[in-house]
Image: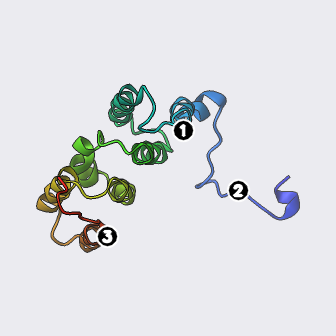
Amino acid sequence: MLKSRGLALNLSKTAIYDSKEAYYHFQIEENKYLDSLENVNKSDPNYNKITTELKKNFKNHFKDQLPKYWDKIAKRYITAFGKMGSLKLLTEIPKVYLNYPGLRPNLLIYLSKIGYKKQTAEKVVEILLEIDVFDDISLYQISELITTWEVLLGDN
């Protein structure tokens, strides 16, 4: 059909999956789970339980990085933490930031949404102490984050 319209698949970019492979690579269950969290906020009576489960699932997500769209789901997890205003991702920030460069922009957006707190500043310092001094783009992005944080007197 494509050839009749003057088109062809680029076989190096095209993957055709059976239903089992598609379910695995598109991570259908994790997408459904993350979709179920769309309207959760701090006023939810189960907020603490939900964010604890979110962190557990986020950490488990890193055990199998073979699915083609693994990084997209990891970014969705980070976004979910930010939307919920949860600080529970902070413990993972330095390790994830340093080991997964593709997730860095999302982690910085998360830190921006959480805003300045003593805890967030400490995590940024941890990253700065470990990051390669020649990683100009990361240093610039972290500097931008720090300069956009609103620091109020008495912030902890």
What kind of element bears circle 1? loop
What kind of element bears circle 3? helix
Q: Nearer the viewer, residue 102 or 57?
A: 57
What kind of element bears circle 2? loop
| Residue 49 percent coordinates (x, y) | 37, 25
Task: Tell me which numbered mark, 3 or 1, is placed earlier along the sequence.
Answer: 1
Q: Nearer the viewer, mark 3 or mark 2?
A: 3
The residue lying at 40 percent from left, 48 percent from top is 82
The residue lying at 54 percent from left, 32 percent from top is 24
Q: Which mark is residue 148?
A: 3
Density class for disc 3 (Cα within 10 Å; few <14, some 14-19, many ≥20) is few
Task: Tell me which numbered mark, 1 or 2, is placed earlier along the sequence.
Answer: 2
The residue lying at 29 percent from left, 39 percent from top is 88
Task: Tell me which numbered mark, 3 or 2, is placed earlier along the sequence.
Answer: 2
| Residue 98 percent coordinates (x, y) | 24, 54
Against 6, is 95 above or below? Answer: above
Q: Which residue is mark 2?
A: 9
Q: Farthest residue toward the front?
A: 153
Mark 2 and mark 1 in contact (Cβ < 8 Å)?
A: no
Disc 3 and disc 2: Cα gap in Å? 45 Å
The residue lying at 39 percent from left, 43 percent from top is 81
Image quadrant where residue 17 sits? top right
**21 sits left or right of 101 in the view:** right
Disc 3 and disc 1: Cα gap in Å? 27 Å
Q: Nearer the viewer, mark 1 or mark 2?
A: 1
Image quadrant where residue 128 sits? bottom left
Against 73, is 1 above or below? Answer: below
| Amino acid type, residue under disc 1 in the picture | Asn
**11 sits left or right of 76 in the view:** right
Q: Which mark is residue 39?
A: 1
